Image (cartoon, rainbow, N blue to C red):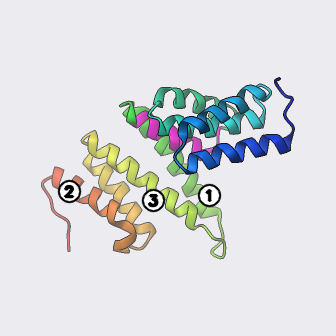
Amino acid sequence: QKGRMNEQQFLQWLNEGKRNQSIGCHDEALRIFTVLYNSSDEYSDWQLTTLNERAHSLHSLYRYMEAIQDLNRVIERWPNHYKAYELRAKCRNSVDEMMDSLSDWTFVITYLKAGISAFTVSMNIESEMKSLYDALCERASLYNRLGESDKAIKDASSAIELFAGVTARCSWAFQLRSEALNNLGKTERA
């Protein structure tokens, strides 16, 4: 049956899998994405899209190593797919592969900073800025776990600067920076 699905059928199945993900039916979503994967040609865009979605379901089911395997294949084909790096970093963090997780977060941060600086002021970059904020906070959290407080402070401060220190938007970054400062025996300046 490989390759016998047309684009419309593929998109219908893909949307059904995503719908199941959105309502928390991750086992059913995984089943659908596995059918799609097995029905797609090797290394086709369809197959890689399916692997990426499958990895989200596997992550939600706490099957991190399987998700990492799927994401490795996606990244092998699409080396600038920063969302795949984000999810792989989360999975790696969940299985205590902290250095590999740091490497993935660093890629995401570098990629997003380059993309954001290339946008003009008139373009809507809110989504990318939120992703960059999250990546900086995730990496700061890892640095705190590794006892690298200076690096955690730097990332948390960079995250706070993204939204000009608006407390409601930056609470996670403020919390991470305070934790790092406490680790160094310092306190947050007023």
Quadrant position of residue 175: bottom left
Q: In which quarter of the image is the C terminus?
A: bottom left
Residues in magenta? 79-93
**How crowded is the residue under tag 2: few (<14 C-alpha within 10 Å), some, or many (20+)?**
some
- Kind of residue sitting beneath label 1: Gly
Mark pair 1, 2: CA separation: 30 Å
- Which residue is disc 1 drawn over? 115
* Residue 84 belongs to magenta span: yes
- Which residue is disc 2 drawn over? 181
Residue 175, relative to residue 14: is it above or below? Answer: below
Residue 124, relative to residue 7: is it above or below? Answer: below
Quadrant position of residue 37: top right
- Which residue is disc 3 drawn over? 133
Sequence-wise first label, 1 or 2:
1
> In terms of secondary structure, where does tag 3 sit?
helix
- Kind of residue sitting beneath label 3: Tyr
Asked if the residue under mark 2 is in contact with the one under mark 3, i.e. CB atoms within 8 Å, the reply is no
Quadrant position of residue 127: bottom right
Q: Which residue is drawn at 30% across and 63% down?
A: 174
Tell me if 56 is positioned left or right of 37 in this view: left
Mark pair 3, 2: CA separation: 19 Å
The residue nearer to you, when weighing 97 against 30, is 30
> In terms of secondary structure, where does tag 2 sit?
helix
Residue 132, relative to residue 98: is it above or below? Answer: below
Tell me if 175 is positioned left or right of 10 in this view: left
Sequence-wise first label, 1 or 3:
1
Place of residue 163 in the rendered image (x, y in percent of width and height, measured from the top left)? 44, 71
Report the label total: 3
